Amino acid sequence: MKTGRKVIGLLLCAAMLVGAAGCNGGTSAGSKSPAAVSAGGESQTGSAEKKSGGTVTVGFSQVGAESDWRTANSESMKGTFTDANGFKLIFDDAQQKQENQITAIRNFIQQEVDYIVLAPVTETGWDTVLQEAKDADIPVIIVDRMVNVKDDSLYTAWVGSNFRAEGDKAVAWMEDFFKSKGRDKDTINIVDIQGTIGASAQIGRTEALEAGVKKNSNWKLVAQQTGEFTQAKGQEVMESVLKQHSNIDVVYCENDNEAFGAIDAIKAAGKKVGTDKGEIMVLSFDSTKAGLNKVLSGEIALDTECNPLHGPRVQNIIEKLKKNGNVDKKAYVDEKMFAADDTVKSVSAGTGKFDVTVVTQDVIKGRAY
Ligand code: AHR
């Protein structure tokens, strides 16, 4: 912990007969925040690594294993933070519970890890525990979803997706699709199977759909419920919605696994998934291999990418912190769109124009997850 690190630092300084100027109490052996970088450009991380023979210890608090995306994300982290790469990874699966993540972070602090990496289940509720990490001089890197904290200095950097942009792209695609089919004046009944409520991925994607419904007066949001990013819950929600609504046009699933569950429910109810009038169009997010296979078969009309391969990105942040402490506070990942056909070739959303890739076997073969 912070105090222990200071004591070790002081003892080392005394033993090496280094003057007090080199041993000020403001930077402990574990202090690696950008502010702790010395004028010579050597961060305090160097001291911590020497303590542990050069190995960098990373405590990673993962949300859980709710989806194929999450599995790919865990594999990316485990495949990056290996012994061979000079890391010791302490991986904690929080099983979707914020209290488990808070406990994990406290354990990481106790274990004096060099870096804490947090994939937060929801945005709020992190101020206290992140303050504890800051007090212990352990840099925190947020990955995937965002945290909503009063003081931005409670984390060092964030890397992840622009979830609102993902939703805006899907909504723009829907607008263009219905227009090109001459259905832009038809009533379009939409079901929103949301992600985990309060997660950035849910907030951004839901907000985008709600904005689309507000903009297009013929779009009706007939049902909106969380599927918690899981296949089982996606199926359960869709089964219950199908009992209440007979004329659904679109199911906007906020991830691939919810889409798989919704498709099973639609088929079991004797309805057809597809993009023709009278069929139920399924939209999804993630673009996992399994998701793209459903695009290839026409069961998912559009899959908007959410890239989970954050391991090397977090490693890059850590390497930069080790060298000079200069990292982007926030970094968004570039993401694509994948459709079953070329009805819509590109969309304009926000300030950008995005190409839509038609899924083929080759596209799926080339996917890393
Ligand atoms: O935060 C990213 C989301 O979380 C992915 O869309 C989803 O599959 C995962 O569980």
Image: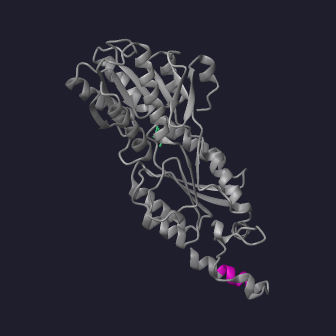
In this rendered view, identify the residue nearer to me: 152 or 111.
152
Whether residue 80 is visible here, answered yes or no, is: yes
x, y percentage for residue 270?
Answer: 29, 14
| Quadrant of the image occupied by residue 242 | top left
Q: Is 37 covered by the magenta stretch? A: no
Q: In this view, does 268 lie to the left or right of 28?
A: left
Q: Residue at x 46, y 41 (%)?
A: 164
Residue at 74% x, 65% y is: 53
Range of magenta residues: 8-13
Q: Quarter-wise, where is residue 54 in the image? A: bottom right
In the rendered image, residue 161, in percent from the top left (x then y), is placed at 53, 43
Q: Is residue 32 in sight in this rendering? A: no
Q: Is residue 305 left or right of 14 when viewed as pictured?
A: left
Q: Quick check: 266 above or below 158?
A: above
Q: Is residue 44 left or right of residue 228?
A: right
Asked if 259 appears above or below 10 in the picture, the reply is above
Q: In this view, does 233 lie to the left or right of 121?
A: left
Query: Residue 265 appears at what percent x and percent y?
Result: 32, 23
In this rendered view, identify the residue nearer to me: 321 or 49: 321
Q: Quadrant of the C terminus?
A: top right
Q: Position of residue 192 (x, y in %)?
A: 33, 32
> Is residue 9 in the magenta section?
yes
**Residue extending furthest toward the left:** 244
Image height check: is 306 above or below 62?
A: above
Most common secondary structure along the magenta stretch: helix
